[in-house]
Amino acid sequence: MIQPDNRSHRTILRELARKAMTGHGLLPDFSPEAEAELEGLHAESTIKGLVRDQRQMLWCSIDNRESRDLDQLTVAESLPGGASRLLVAIADVDSWVRKGSAIDDHAKQNTTSVYTTAEVFPMLPEKLSTDITSLNYHVERLALVVDMNISPDGELMKSDVYRALVRSRAKLDYASVGAWIEGDEPVPPEIERVPGLADNIKLQDTIAILMKKFRHEKGALDFESRESTPVFEGDMIRELREIQRTRARDIIEEFMISSNEATAGYLAEKRFPTFRRIVRNPRRWTRICEIASENGTALPGEPDSKSLQEFMAAAKKNDPENFPDLSLSIIKLLGPGEYSIGFPGETSEGHFGLAVRNYSHSTAPNRRYPDLITHRLLKSAIAGKEVPYTHSELDELALHCTQKEDDAKKVERQVSKSAAALVLEHHIGEEYDAIVTGAAEKGTWVRIQHPHIEGRIIHGAGGLDVGLKIRVQLVATDIENGYIDFKTVGS
């Protein structure tokens, strides 16, 4: 068993993360063959095919302050009649990561970057993801550009996808941009020193607000979550701090959703298969209806995203303080997303939570393998070439990416709970308000309110179901396995 007093929290969590990676069939390190390939890669590239020059546009990135693998740049402009043009540049990773290479084999095995509390296991070597393929400040990069026209009410009217050469004018972060556009802080210096960029970001904010409103009116679900992240002091965890959401995150989220819809639409128009992201109709719709009924709303007997969104919107307006708990319950009951192939002429399930039929992941190829697959499909479609994958390859990849994404989430969740166990180990016996987040044969889970930590009910789980608010007592922690155990208190 781990003796946490003998080593730093960061060291303990790194060891646990690597153990969890291998335990779930994920590769924590790159192979010698991949490292050898990496040595031969350089940022300078030979541009082949038709590539537009868009280096003069006011491109900028908005991401977490510490992010170095920058996948997207955005820019917008006003059009006559209140419409807008929105452009999203996405890193052209495929130009350096060739299908079947050793680096590609590693990425295909893990299918995603794995973000644990103490260490990040990148899908691609950092020389690629944070340098050669990253859309870094003031450097020229190849990109796939999703060029969209947005109506005055926020609807995606038409779009195009093409290759372009771009240059970022500013590296921005969610916190400072959000504080500025919400009126709490002055304009960040990175924005102020670029003429016209402040107005451009304000336009992007306006477009994002309109797009979000339009999506929700069509039935896309509006969630609000509470998440905590460990704050280190040196190599020891000092506290678990709640992550603050700002409108800057909404800008990127809305633009990425529209880009993913546009890229799927482009492939469908070209009669290419699409590597779709789907969320099926919720299997636990009956429990969702029960929760809505407990809040004074009757939902239809069959899954209907528009009715659910209307209920969610009213609940947020009437009780904003408790809305994150309601959101968490609905998210858990909707079930996980998965990857599926949409072949030309076939009808497949859409994304229930986003209320769209044709949706692909395409905006994070440095971090997600499905996005790299989509880019290869897009580039072949743009160039008029054949589909670069067989149907059976795509079906196998969809299943594999779904499975490995689940494995990656298990690793992240396990290490996160080990970090929480380190924080809570001296709080055995204390009581907390909690909400039930999972109820199945394999166990019942709750999330306590302060700090936002999830654990298992080991005593008193009978009759509990997702969404119920209860009182619990912490009875045990297991740092090595990431276990946090509670028992119910009272009725």
Image (cartoon, rainbow, N blue to C red):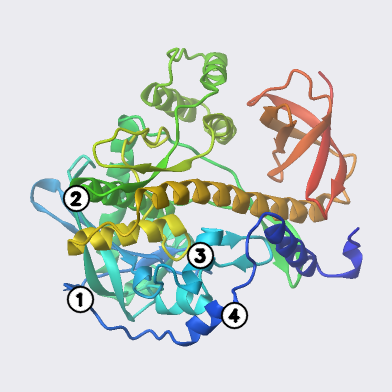
Q: Is residue 98 left or right of residue 13?
A: left
For disc 2, the marked residue is: 270
Amino acid marked by disc 4: Pro
For badge 1, the amino acid type reads Gln
Mark 4 → mark 2, Cα distance in angstroms = 39 Å
**Image position of 4 with respect to 257: above or below:** below
Contact check, label 1 and label 3, Cβ < 8 Å: no
Secondary structure under badge 1? loop
When asked about the image quadrant of residue 299, the answer is top left
- Determine the secondary structure under disc 4: helix
> Which numbered disc flags the more N-terminal residue, 1 or 3?
1
271, above or below 308, in the image? below
The residue that label 3 is drawn on is 107
Compare marks 4 and 1 and give the one earlier in the sequence. Answer: 4
Expressed as whole percent of the image width and height from the top left, the position of residue 121 reads 60, 66
Note whether residue 123 is visible.
Answer: no
Q: Is residue 396 above or below residue 51?
A: above
* Residue displayed at 64% across by 26% down: 466
Disc 2/disc 3 C-alpha distance (Å) = 27 Å
Tell which tag, 3 or 4, sits nearer the viewer.
4
Location of residue 458 in the rendering, given as x and y in whole percent from the top left corner = 84, 32
Q: Residue at x 48, y 62 (%)?
A: 367
Comes first in the chain, label 2 or label 1: 1
Residue lying at 60% horizontally and 33% vertically, measured from the top left? 325
Q: Are marks 4 and 1 in contact (CB under 8 Å)?
A: no
Q: Are marks 3 and 4 in contact (CB under 8 Å)?
A: no
Q: Which mark is residue 32?
A: 4
Q: Pick whichever, 323 or 30, lies toward us.
A: 30
For disc 1, the marked residue is: 56
Q: Crowding at label 1, few (<14), some or many (≥20) Cα neighbours within 10 Å?
A: few
Where residue 337 appears, as percent x and y from the top left, is: 49, 40
Mark 2–mark 1 distance (CA, rounded to whole Å): 30 Å
